[in-house]
Amino acid sequence: MLPKTFVFDFGKSLGDYATFIDPNNNQFEVMIERISDSVFLTTEFNAIHDFYDVRLGGTIVMMFTGAGQFGINVIDRS
């Protein structure tokens, strides 16, 4: 679920899909689902997790860059 303050400020900038782009220009299309006042990243978000093999302690940092796009960095704690 995206933080409510983010949804309040930027929710109208999000369509049905968001594009996540890493520093190597790998791109992931993720479906956005709205339920009541909440916004969830659903279909294909696990592809990011699987692509980077994120494990316990790992972090995916997302930065909204506008127009339904997010930059991402993965921090691996292993």
Image: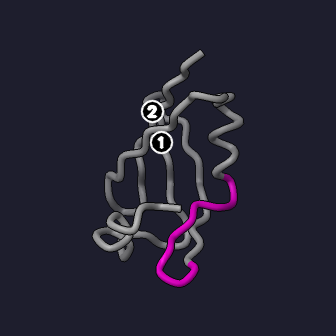
Measure how far apart labels 2 and 1 are at the Cα level: 9 Å
Please report contact status of discs 2 and 1: CB closer than 8 Å, yes or no: no
Q: Which residue is at 28% across, 70% downward?
A: 9
The amino acid sitting under disc 2 is Asn
Query: Which residue is denoted by mark 1 in the rendering?
Result: 21
Q: Residue furthest front?
A: 57
Residue 33 image point, x, y percent: 59, 72
Residue 36 image point, x, y percent: 53, 84
Q: Which residue is at 35% across, 53% downward?
A: 64
Q: Residue furthest bottom?
A: 36
- Image quadrant holding the C terminus, namely top right
The foreground one among 27 and 76 is 76
Residue 29 image point, x, y percent: 59, 54
The amino acid sitting under disc 1 is Ile
Tag 2, which secondary structure? strand
Tag 1, which secondary structure? strand
- Horizontal side, residue 5 vs residue 78: left or right: left
Q: Is residue 46 magenta?
A: no
Q: Residue furthest top?
A: 78
Q: Which residues are magenta?
A: 35-44
Number of residues whose C-alpha sits closer than 10 Å to that of mark 1, classed few (under 14), some (14–19) or many (20 or more): some
Query: Which residue is denoted by mark 2 in the rendering?
Result: 73
Looking at the rendered structure, which numbered label has been put on residue 3? none
Looking at marks 2 and 1 on the same chain, the residue that comes earlier in the sequence is marked by: 1
Residue 18 image point, x, y percent: 50, 60
Where 78 falls versus 10 (above or below)? Answer: above
Q: Residue furthest left?
A: 9
Number of residues whose C-alpha sits closer than 10 Å to that of mark 2, classed few (under 14), some (14–19) or many (20 or more): some
Where 23 falls versus 47 (above or below)? Answer: above
- Horizontal side, residue 39 vs residue 14: left or right: right
Where 42 falls versus 35 (above or below)? Answer: above
